[in-house]
Amino acid sequence: MIKLQLTNDNKFWGYRRPDGKVGVRNHVLILPTITCATQAAKQITELVHGTVSFIHQHGCAQVGIDYEQTFRTYVGMGANPNVYGVVVLGLGCETHQARSVAGELAKTNKPVEVVSIQDHGGTLTAIAEGAKIAARMVQEASAQTRELCDISELIIGTECGGSDACSGISANPAVGAVSDMIIEHGGTAILAETTELIGAEHLLAERAVDDRVAKKAYQVIKAMENRSIQMGVDIRTGNPSPGNIRGGLSTLEEKSLGAANKAGSKQLQEVIDYAESPTKKGLVWMDTPGHDIEQLTGMVAGGAQVVLFTTGRGTPTGSPIAPVIKISTNTGIYEKMSENIDLNAGTIIEGKESIESVGTRIFEEIAKVSSGKLTKAEVLKQHDFGIWRIGPTF
Amino acid sequence: MVTNYKTVMMKPVDKVATALENIPANSIVTVSCQDKNYTVELLEEIEFGHKFAVCLIPQGTDIVKYGEVIGRAVQNIEPGAHVHVHNIEGIRGRGDQVAINQ
């Protein structure tokens, strides 16, 4: 096990929310519950400084567990402590009613208001109404000051995307060391990408806190694997991706064994469903696909304030509400895509730096970013959002 | 002549090592992990991040990396050969094989 040395007092400057949670950003979120409202939401973000939103294609003609998962994702995005207040923007006739989402969000006691395009008599009126509310919220948000918070209040999402053969040697073990350190200080780290744990599940199940958690780990793996089996295809036709394969990864199992390194060495406390909030501190596995944006969205909706994202092929990925710290697995891609990548772990491959040393640099960056330093994805307004749909649209 | 090209083998039981730089064909490289050492002549160029066999891997047997099974050889793989999608297959998520067997 790799032990990192403490380099500061394990504090950061965050925003305390009415529900007691701590945010690292102070966004006003324009939350469209239906694809029909996403363009109006985007218009509001162009009118009002300090607002964020996202484009998506969901929120209507969804049923059962698929309806619930999308609903939970919307609520989770608004409830994330990085969000000061929410303008929930609906059309009016959709299955995912803006008022229902707002009703759930009200439980956080943060400012929440609803605007409906149909009720307000059209797009322009709804934009004007939403912008007025958002402008007031942004000004109120700007009056809130950061306070000193403990690292134990952080939920750190971990992710690898555009992996290569270096991922499992450099950046993922370094993120694993950070995950251990966060947990040792009372925080939470989310491991996800169930697809990319196929072939490594026994290693995680061995670390489960009890049999029930171990059983759930095997269950989510089996369910994910069965989806490809039911389609009658080799999962390798989609994962590892062509870029992963060019980077030297030959099979999904190989990719998984590298990806599992992000989980460090701590006990697995629970396995939670997509976009659910962890109920335990420590290492938590969220059941998500390997798809980068769907995974990211699930973790952020689950309450992750900061995400660590390792990449060997290079990616621009970012979230509208959570800073994503990009860490390259090799120095070549760091130099080639430095406009997107925040930190380089390729020094481990070159023998210039240890896993511990890179882990310490990442840990320090988490403290800085949590206190307000912008990540490259934030500067570039990389507001990615994607929901893992688990049922057809009707 | 043995070269100094950088390689890494993750666990002593592994049957493959990873090139940490582009290595030309016919290079003789050393691979070591804990008490296990191999000297291997590469049969072809191995690109940065790609794998080569450190020992003979017979057709149908497991490919071991990280001390775990990452797939299966679809043909005999000689020491020093490039190990990749052309000569190994995944074992998991093989809906295609289920379809064939039905």
Image: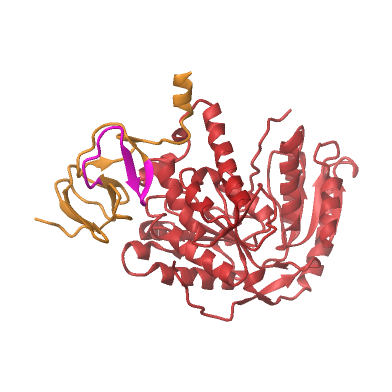
Q: Tell me the residue at 68%/42% (across/down).
A: A56
Q: Position of residue A342 (x, y in %)?
A: 49, 64
Asked if one can make out residue A44 in the rendered structure from this viewpoint, the answer is: no
Image point (30%, 51%), residue name: B13
Q: Nearer the viewer, residue B36 or A190?
A: B36
Viewer-proximal residue, A333 or B25? B25
Query: For residue A335, what is the image quadrant?
Result: bottom left
Report the front residue among A128 and A302: A302
Looking at the image, which is closer to me, A221 or A288? A221
- Quadrant location, the C terminus of chain A: top right
Q: Residue at x 25, y 35 (%)?
A: B58
Seen in the picture, residue A262 relative to A251 is either above or below; the reply is: below
Q: Colour of chain A?
A: red
Q: Quadrant of the N terminus of chain A?
A: bottom left
User: In this image, A19 relative to B100: left or right?
Assistant: right
Residue B59 within the magenta-colored segment of the rendering: yes
Which residues lie in the magenta part? B53-70
* Residue A273 covered by magenta stretch: no
Q: Using the rendered view, name the quadrant where residue B56 is placed.
A: top left
- Residue A147: tell me if it is visible: yes
Q: Colour of chain B?
A: orange
Coordinates of residue A390 in the picture (x, y in percent): 66, 36
Residue lying at the far front of the rendered structure: A211
Task: Estimate the x, y position of residue A211 in percent, counting from the top left.
Answer: 60, 50
| Picture coordinates of residue A386, whole percent (x, y) | 63, 45
